[in-house]
Image (spheres, rainbow, N blue to C red):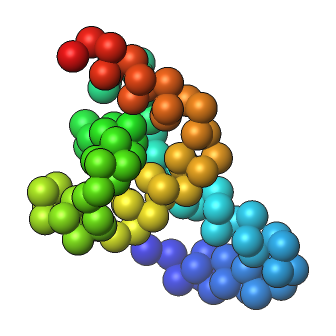
Amino acid sequence: MNPRLVDSLIQVIQALSPEERKLLESRLKLNAIQQTPGICGGHARIQNTRIPVWILVSFRQQGANDTELLQNYPSLTPEDLTAAWDYYKQYRSEIDLAIATQHEDD
């Protein structure tokens, strides 16, 4: 760990305007989502897992709440779910298409 780097980052973050800080937070949350060809069909997934965002959104649409999802996916954190919900807000059509495609395959 580099304490000087951390201190420098803190200074930069403190100097951000509210709009810039909101953008930074949004981008950091989206970093929790990965897309890798060949893993989960290339769909957006929670970082370092094989849990696609579409499956979490689908369960939520079926009535599952965050507590239930965290119980069923113990490797996930509340922050992971927040990242998934934020990703869905930003890329709704992508996730809705993935859900529809999966339902067609059933």
Question: Can you say whether 17 is above or below 82 in the image?
Answer: below
Q: Position of residue 25 (x, y in %)?
A: 64, 68
Residue at coordinates 64% horizontally, 47% vertically from top-left?
90
Q: Position of residue 4 (x, y in %)?
A: 60, 82
Residue at coordinates 59% horizontally, 32% vertically from top-left?
93
Q: Position of residue 70 (x, y in %)?
A: 21, 64
In this view, the residue in front, 42 or 56, is 56
Residue 81 as seen in the image, left or right of residue 76: right
Question: Can you say whether 96 is above or below 72 in the image?
Answer: above
State the image quarter where residue 19 is shown. Answer: bottom right
The quarter of the rendered structure image containing the N terminus is bottom left
The quarter of the rendered structure image containing the C terminus is top left
In the image, farthest residue toward the top: 105
In the image, farthest residue toward the front: 62
In this view, the residue in front, 75 or 60, is 60
Can residue 18 be seen here? The reply is yes
In this view, the residue in front, 20 or 106, is 106
